Image: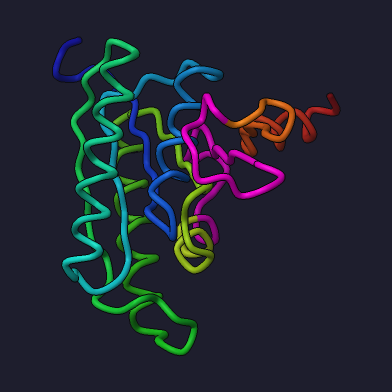
Amino acid sequence: MTESSPKKVYITMLGRSVWAVLNSYHAVLREKEFFPDEIVLFAEGKASEKLLKEIDATVRGLAILSEEFHISPAIKYEVISESECEISFDADFVKMVQHILGLIKKRKKDGDVIAIDITPGKKTLVAGTLLPINLSDVDHIFYLSIKETVPRPYMMIPYQIQQLNDFKEQVVRAMNGQ
């Protein structure tokens, strides 16, 4: 790949569960064959020892899964708020929205393929990511729906209770009358 070639960028969010990040990523790799060149992991909250341990475990898990699919994306993380984003903290929410939107717009302008995985994100982080974007700003919006919360690896969760969705793909099909 040349320096100017478009990159596949996978944006995900650390919410309440490391498993949610890893299982959803595994599903995207296996079912959608979306193999990113770069992963950006957003986490919100104070950079406490607990949060940093969760981020470390998540980054290690993303790297292990990537290796299993013979890819080695650059993995970056950002803690985007010094407090857990609550609706009452307008300034934090607005700053978060601007930051993520800025990343998406810049990378899209560079010609990159953008996938956002909203499965593991807290509602404020997901809302802040999706509200300001246009449909053309992203190429995929992934969501792994699981009928019951199961803190186990993806391959150990029965396929009957899970479904990987690409909401952008579904919206485009609906708009085209399919």
In this orientation, which residue lies closer to the viewer: 112 or 93? 93
Q: Is residue 137 left or right of residue 77?
A: right
- Residue 100 place in picture, x, y as percent: 35, 56
- Residue 147 place in picture, x, y as percent: 71, 44
State whether residue 92 is above or below residue 20. below
State whether residue 168 is above or below residue 49. above
State whether residue 14 is above or below residue 47. above
Q: Is residue 119 magenta?
A: no
Q: Residue at x 32, y 15 (%)?
A: 68
Q: Residue at x 53, y 63 (%)?
A: 127
Q: Is residue 12 left or right of residue 77?
A: right
- Residue 13 place in picture, x, y as percent: 39, 51
- Residue 172 place in picture, x, y as percent: 70, 32
Is the N terminus in the top left, top right, bottom left or bottom right quadrant? Answer: top left
**In terms of image quadrants, where is residue 106?**
top left
Q: Residue at x 53, y 65 (%)?
A: 123
Is the C terminus in the top left, top right, bottom left or bottom right quadrant? Answer: top right
In this orientation, which residue lies closer to the viewer: 151 or 163? 151
In this orientation, which residue lies closer to the viewer: 167 or 71? 71
Q: Is residue 144 left or right of residue 20?
A: right
Magenta part of the chain: 130-156
Q: Is residue 147 magenta?
A: yes
